[in-house]
Amino acid sequence: MIRVAVGIEAIGVYAGRASVGVREIFDRRSLDPSRFDNLMMERKSVGLPCEDAVTNAVNAAKPLVDALTEAERGAVEAVIVGTESGLDFGKPISTYVQEYLGLPRTCRSFEVKHACYGGTAALQTAVALIAATPVDGVKALVIAADAASATDRDSYWEPSQGAGAVAMLVGKDPHILELDPGASGLYSHEVMDTLRPRADLEAGDSDLSLLSYLHCLEQAYRMYERRVDGCDLRSTFAHLVFHTPFAGMVKGAHRTLMRKVTGASPADIEADFTHRLAPSLRYGRQVGNVYSASLYLALCSLIDNGALAPPQRAGLFSYGSGCASEFFSGVLPPGARARLAAQRLPEAIAARHSLDWDDYEQVSDLAVHRMAGVRDHVFDPEPYDALYRKCLDGRGLLVLDRIKDFHRAYRWS
Amino acid sequence: MDAEILALLRRTVVTVVPEIDATEVVPDARLADLGCNSIDRADIVTLVMEELGVQIPVGEFGGDHDVRSLVGLFGAYA
């Protein structure tokens, strides 16, 4: 069998248009300030009431789709959305995404779910579809897209609930990341650590989730090490990129993995963290946890901010509560940074509108109308008109227009 | 056995968070109340399991544990 390179050809991020400071959340909610440093977060993106997982997905993917030629667009034979923010038990949000992106009807369309692992499940599915086809030029569009459910006020979840999505075009010209075929370590089992049992509820046991993440990281890495000859945690990967619920958790997980696998000293581990992992956390510290997209936002952060001398191998760890995990790897080709730089992500993140507290509370209250299960609603931005005008109006972004008999209709802002 | 595990837990707490006085690690105390953040708590539990040479299913750590229940849990697997 001839080995064909498959991976991410292009990547796009929607990081929201509004944000709030994490320090302010701690102050306003009287959260224990000693836990602030532990999060290693500065801001988080906030979705406006007319933004849901569909608009986040489309707004992340539209620049990628717009850049395709007509022939290339016609070659997109799969649109796969990884999400834990589905809107219907039967109808996947990929149907809306396909429609509003103008993708061809000659296309597979489906949604996959496994909490924050959903984006990786979608990516690996797409990579397998592309690797398996003998047809030249076929592409798949993978989007990891979520929207927070009701703001979990007065809890330590609230500071990290972010907003956004990452879209990835998968094909045989992997300009962003070429995945190492078969190089995956897997570890999954049943555990009830974090959950979204209702459209308006995110809940969980943070200690249990953290322990589960640590355990899965070690076990998935151990399987990767058994599978890939000559693998060495310190030398095989020039960079590491982990699913990032909050940056402090990734730092703790790296420390535990390095201690267990390499026995390195605390000083060595700290230096290794700064060199190999910290560049992947810069965007997450500003945007918050974007659920299934979080690992891929971290990948963008690495490509924009890491000391890249490509081609270099990156080790990636994906974790989804419940739980499923995968440690896998890929090579960053020369040119990856230049291609991502065209997206001007640092500028987009910096350009988000900084919400004052009353606005944050208002948009949090109004978010209930965009949740799964809403039968009828008209999304009139009038109650937050000034915010709508600053953040969305005239920007050509997709927003919710109305829901009628559960059917969502969207429009361009 | 429990006394030994309690002593091990005390040593581990102080290793991870040196600001904590070992005498405060008593059965009714909760690690969070003593000043251990969530990452400290995960480190402590992981290090104690390593020291005991046991791997306790992570699901067992669900819920709200005090020092007494943690020692009991470690003891059940040690």
Image: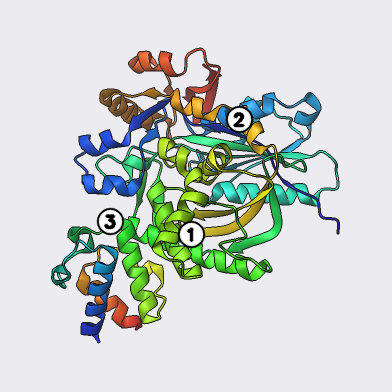
- Dot in front, 3 or 2: 2
Q: Position of residue A360 (x, y in %)?
A: 31, 27
* Tag 3: amino acid: Asn
Which numbered dot is residue A47?
none
Observer-nearest residue: A235 or A368? A235
The residue sitting at 74% across, 30% down in the picture is A104
Of all residues, the one furthest to the bottom in this rendering is B1
Single out the mark in the foreground, 1 or 2. Answer: 2
| Number of the front mark, 1 or 3 | 3
Which residue bears the numbered disc 2?
A341
Seen in the picture, residue B60 relative to A288 is either above or below; the reply is below
Task: Classify mark 2: helix, strand or loop.
Answer: helix
Q: Which mark is residue B37?
A: 3
The quadrant holding residue B72 is bottom left
- The subunit letter for the residue under badge 3 reads B
Q: Secondary structure at mark 1?
A: loop
Which disc number belongs to residue A323?
A: 1
Q: Chain of mark 1?
A: A
Of residues A344 and A320, which is closer to you in this image? A344
Chain-order first, disc 1 or disc 2: 1
- Quick check: can you spot residue A286? yes
Q: Amino acid at mark 1?
A: Cys
Question: Can residue A115 be seen here?
Answer: no
The residue under the point 36% across, 45% down is A40
**Percent from the top left, x then y, of residue A68?**
73, 27
Instruction: Report if the CB atoms under discs 3 and 2 are less than 8 Å apart.
Output: no
Q: Amino acid at mark 2?
A: Ala
